[in-house]
Image (cartoon, rainbow, N blue to C red):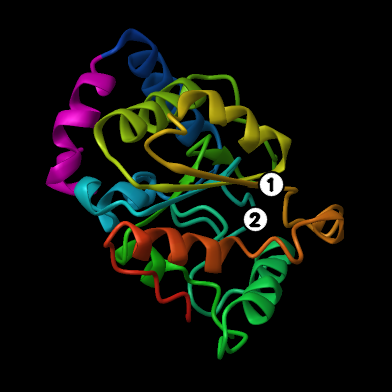
Amino acid sequence: MAERYDSSWEPILKPLFRQDYMRSLSAFVQHERRQAQVFPPETLVLNAFRLTPFDNIKVVILGQDPYHNDGQAHGLSFSVPKGMALPPSLKNIYTELVSDISGFQYPTSGDLTKWAEQGVLLLNATLTVRAHQAASHQRRGWEEFTDQVIHLVSQKLENVVFMLWGSYAQKKSMLIDPKKHLILKAVHPSPLSAHRGFFGCKHFSQANAYLQSKGRQPIDWQI
């Protein structure tokens, strides 16, 4: 598995992979792949850990589940590969960016790789899903794994911005030390809730102001 994530993650992920629940999770996912189509492809399950080195994490944006339709999931929360139609939540994220970041141009691509390469860890709580069956791999062990990742990021790093959108993500705040990091909370950017406080939350400019105040490079949010 080593080639699927950046070597800086080795001390973090290696001990987690050895835990019993990860062994049974791995067996479950392999069994699922034999039975049906599973997203994202095996080589992209750990894509967030490949594109964002551990020591470079500046922002964590937490999603819940990978996209479950063909060709959408590529291991980064809220992101889809170039050429794919923009999902509704991502459209709302871009709408907020247009109003929050001066000069931001509404993108045509939904590929957020550029964010990941700048230190934005785009982490879903669950890292796989059965094709066309939302939430089908929840409560199989992924949440335990990603909770430990969030806790270790909080514990070992300083001055990271955690963007927690929606009640599911906000529950993860208990894993984060608010004295060392900035926690930003808003409703989820989905069309069902975005108008209730995601629009106007200004998380992206707040993140950059915080990073700069700590002597860190801000994120260029333009895709």
The answer to whether 144 is drawn above or below residue 112 in the figure is: above
Image location (x, y in percent) of residue 213:
36, 61
Cα–Cα span, label 1 and label 2: 5 Å
The image quadrant that residue 92 belongs to is bottom right
Q: Secondary structure at mark 2?
A: loop
Please check the rendered image and state whether residue 11 is part of the magenta-colored stretch, yes or no. Answer: yes
Please report the residue visible at 36 percent of the width from the left and 45 percent of the height from the top: 42
SS category of the residue bearing label 1: loop
Say which quadrant the N terminus sits in: top left
* Tag of residue 69: 2
Q: Amino acid at mark 2?
A: Asn
User: What predominant SS class does the magenta segment belong to?
Assistant: helix
Extent of the magenta region: 1-18
In the displayed structure, does residue 171 sit left or right of residue 116? right
| Circle on res. 109 | none
- For mark 1, what is the residue? 132
Q: Residue at x 54, y 23 (%)?
A: 174
- The count of marks equals 2
The image quadrant of residue 89 is bottom right
Q: Label 1 sits on what residue type?
A: His
Mark 1, other Cα within 10 Å: few <14 / some 14–19 / many ≥20? some
Residue lying farthest to the front in this orientation: 213
Q: Is residue 5 visible?
A: no
Q: Are marks 1 and 2 in contact (CB under 8 Å)?
A: yes
The x, y position of residue 177, in whole percent, is 43, 29
Task: Where is residue 10? Give x, y as percent.
Answer: 15, 35
Q: Residue at x 48, y 71 (%)?
A: 111
Q: Which of disc 2 and disc 1 is earlier in sequence?
A: 2
Looking at the image, residue 22 lies above or below residue 199 = above
Q: Residues within 10 Å of mark 2 (few under 14, many from 20)?
A: some
Q: In the drawing, does residue 201 fall left or right of residue 58?
A: right
